[in-house]
Amino acid sequence: MYVILVYDVSEKRVAKMLKLCRRYLNWIQNSVLEGELTQSGLRAMESEIKELIDPSTDSVIMFKSRDSRWLEKRIWGIEKGLTDVFL
């Protein structure tokens, strides 16, 4: 499944959240990541996020789609995190 994840967490958890999410998804912009995940990968990431955040102050939003081809992505300005670069 294709996932877009957006988070707004306390400053003291920002680096940990980015590190956690980058293990599963591709960073594309400040506090925004995207990528393909399996069901087990999704469950693992969700579990770790729930352990990291403080639900009384932090916010995490996830958009899911069966496939990235069902999304139309438009970018204005600079594309910060290139996800289509292959070496």
Image (spheres, helix red, strand yellow):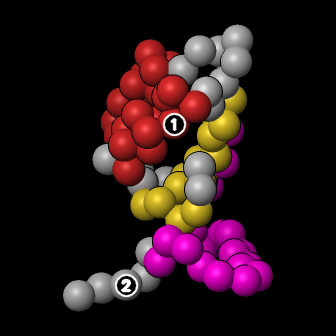
Residue at image point 44% right, 16% down: 51
Residue 85's disc number = 2
Q: Earlier in the sequence, mark 2 or mark 1?
A: 1
The single residue placed furthest to the left in the displayed view is 87
- Quadrant including the C terminus: bottom left
Residue at image point 59% right, 56% down: 30
- Asked if the residues shown at circle 2 and circle 1 are in contact, with their CB atoms under 8 angstroms apart, the answer is no
Residue at image point 37% right, 43% down: 19
Of the residues shown, which amino acid type is indicated by label 1?
Answer: Val
Q: How many other residues sit within 10 Å of disc 1, few (<14), some (14-19) or many (≥20)?
A: some
> Is residue 19 visible to the viewer in this orientation of the structure?
yes
Would residue 67 be counted in the magenta stretch? yes
Residue 52 percent across, percent down from the top left: 46, 21
* Closer-to-camera residue (62/81): 81
Q: Which residues are magenta?
A: 61-82
Residue 71 percent across, percent down from the top left: 68, 69
- Using residue 5 as the reference point, say whether residue 27 is left or right of it: left
Tell me the element at label 1. helix
Residue beneath disc 1? 14
> Is residue 38 visible to the viewer in this orientation of the structure?
no
Would residue 50 be counted in the magenta stretch? no
- Using residue 87 as the reference point, say whether residue 50 is left or right of it: right
Residue at image point 32% right, 47% down: 23
Of the residues shown, which amino acid type is indicated by label 2?
Answer: Val
